[in-house]
Image (spheres, rainbow, N blue to C red):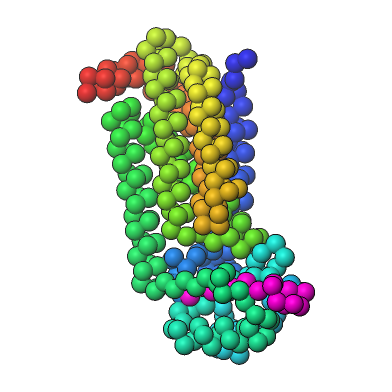
Amino acid sequence: MKLSVNKQRSLWWAISAAIILSGLIAMAISWRQIGTPLRPSLDFVGGTRLQLERDCSKPGNCDQPINITAVRETLASQGLGSSSIQVVGQDQQGVSIRTKTLNVEERTKLQTALREKIGAFDPKSTQIDTVGPTIGRQLLNSGLIALIVSFAGIMIYLSLRFQFDYAVLAIVALFHDVLIAVGIFSILGLVQGVEVDSLFIVALLTITGFSVNDTVVIYDRIREVLKLNPNQPINSVVDDAVNQTLARSLNTTLTTLLTLFAIFLFGGETLKNFALALIVGFIAGAYSSIFVASTLLSWWRERTTNQSQPVSAIASDAIDTSTRSDDA
């Protein structure tokens, strides 16, 4: 069965728009509540994070889940009332607290007060991280610069390999993928308290690389079909190219997702959100390559054809570009 992506392109664009709009609304709500579109981790804002877990080997220590109100009162008594508190663990016997940067004496005092209020903690499960605000800002700035540079590099590469409008539409598809990943994590930050750390920036960079690779494969096939059938309507050319690469795109994505799901389920807490970001981004990337980048190209070529030149002339452009690229 032949898939006609152009026949229902309004539907594909509406689905993308709905998901992106949901993410943008979540980012606006997040900005209003916590001052940032995503819930930043310690990596970006700096401070001290204490991850404490009750010692359930002591009789009666874990009879009840940790009372978050008691934790908040204890922090307020230490002058840390603005700290972020999250009860964690399947039985709610752990607590994650993010405060301003604390020195050793302040941390010890806080741990002692918490122990007296909610019970003894298991020292083997205690985790304390401290990141300075300057390092956090540097990490965020470096990550954003890396993302901008990668977009610029992709733009230049695609402009040279294909044509400028191919590159612009591929970048639109990349923004689509990044916005979906960021939007989903904004929603998760609001409903589940999921934070983004420096690994999230790495995930976004990986998503852009994977997504553009899929788009380049489809663009390559579009160029080849145009070479063979220069007078074929652009919609038909794009549909043929998508169908010829569809199995390859789906198989590559599904194979990669199997590995990512394994990391998500068994890779531990450190890699869990990283794997989740990649899963969301790779699915969005496969979708955008097939249903967004290709249909945008055919829509744009239809529009420019109607205004200025016949389809056969566009096909000739593509052949000429291909020839230049191959020669290079």
| Residue at image coords 57%, 69% | 125
Residue 3 vs residue 310, the one in the foreground? 3
- Where 200 falls versus 72 (above or below)? above
Q: Is residue 85 above or below residue 286?
A: below
Q: Is residue 130 left or right of residue 64?
A: left
Q: Quadrant of residue 29?
A: bottom right
Camera-side residue of 228 and 246: 246
Left or right: 26, with 274 as reference point: right
Q: Which residue is at the front of the view, 220 or 22?
A: 220
Asked if residue 174 lies in the magenta stretch, the reply is: no
Q: Where does the C terminus fall, quadrant-wise?
A: top left
Q: Residue at x 43, y 20 (%)?
A: 222
Name the quadrant of the N terminus.
Answer: top right
Residue range highlighted in magenta: 48-63
- Quadrant hosting residue 161: top left
**What is the x, y in percent for residue 3?**
59, 20
Could one spot residue 295 in this view of the protein?
Answer: no
Could you say where residue 100 lies in the image, as x and y percent from the top left? 48, 79
Residue at coordinates 50% horizontally, 64% vertically from top-left? 40
- In magenta stretch: residue 58: yes
Picture coordinates of residue 66, whole percent (x, y)? 71, 75
Q: Residue at x 51, y 57 (%)?
A: 270
Tell me, yes or no, if residue 109 can be seen here: yes
Q: How many marks?
A: 0
Measured as percent of width and height from the top left, residue 279 is found at 55, 43
Above/below status of 13 relative to 79: above
